[in-house]
Image (cartoon, helix red, strand yellow):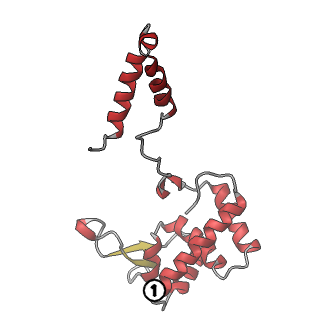
Amino acid sequence: MREWRPATIRQVRAALRHVYSQENFGEQYPLAIGVLTCLDRAKGAGRKARLPLRTSAKKLKRVPKDKSQSLLVELLHESSSAYAEPLAAYIIATETVGLRPGEWLQAWIERDMQTGQPTLVVRNEKTTNGRGNGDIRRIHLSGIASVEMEAIYSLVKFFEGMSEADGCRAISGMSKLLWRCCKRLWPTEKKSIS
């Protein structure tokens, strides 16, 4: 016998409930009351188990400034992890220039030949199928405050010379530290910073 789809089971259950609940049907067919009771008990029968929310649904789409500040204080003053300072630099630098995590692995700073201003050079991760703005992006860093510049330089130096595997391990370690800090600061929050 083929299995019925959940929608079919729901429709059959509703039809039987309707027929069995008609006037005098239970008196004429006493077994119908038992079947109706079983149908009501098996309300979830045939229904797929509900999947947990996907991870993207559990992530904040933007980080409010007050949460960002609380997180930086937690990292710089409370955490003893080796990834605390790089993660703090990552948060500040990413808020400033908006790079993806993997783009920091192959980022470097050079001086613009015409203006002499520092430029962040990044291998663009979104270059497949004609997406993105080419293989390399250049982000001019003129007019950026000293705290943000220091974070950008610090992060570029942190990843400098790392192999891709080591860089991925470092990003994973920072991600885990971020999760632990968020759970410590906001234990009841449903959505998290990632």
Q: Is residue 148 visible?
A: no
Q: Position of residue 3 (x, y in %)?
A: 30, 44
Q: Position of residue 107 (x, y in %)?
A: 44, 81
Above-or-below relation of 177 to 39: below
Residue depicted at x 59% and y 71%: 176
Residue depicted at x 72% and y 68%: 74
Q: Residue furthest left?
A: 129
Q: Residues within 10 Å of mark 1 (few under 14, many from 20)?
A: few
Q: Is residue 66 visible?
A: yes
Q: In the figure, is residue 106 to the left or right of 83? A: left
Kind of residue at badge 1: Ala
Q: Residue furthest top?
A: 23
Query: Would you name the residue on which mark 1 appears?
Result: 165
Above-or-below relation of 12 to 156: above
Residue depicted at x 47% and y 77%: 104
Which quadrant of the view contains residue 184? bottom right
Residue depicted at x 42% and y 72%: 139
Find numbered disc 1 in the image and state the secondary structure of the residue it sits on: helix
Q: In the figure, is residue 77 to the left or right of 130? A: right
Quadrant for the N terminus in the image: top left
Q: Residue furthest bottom?
A: 161
Which quadrant of the view contains residue 35? top left
Q: Position of residue 128 (x, y in %)?
A: 26, 70
**Front-most of 142 and 154?**
154
Q: Position of residue 56 (x, y in %)?
A: 47, 56
Quadrant for the C terminus in the image: bottom right
**Front-most of 171 and 58?**
58
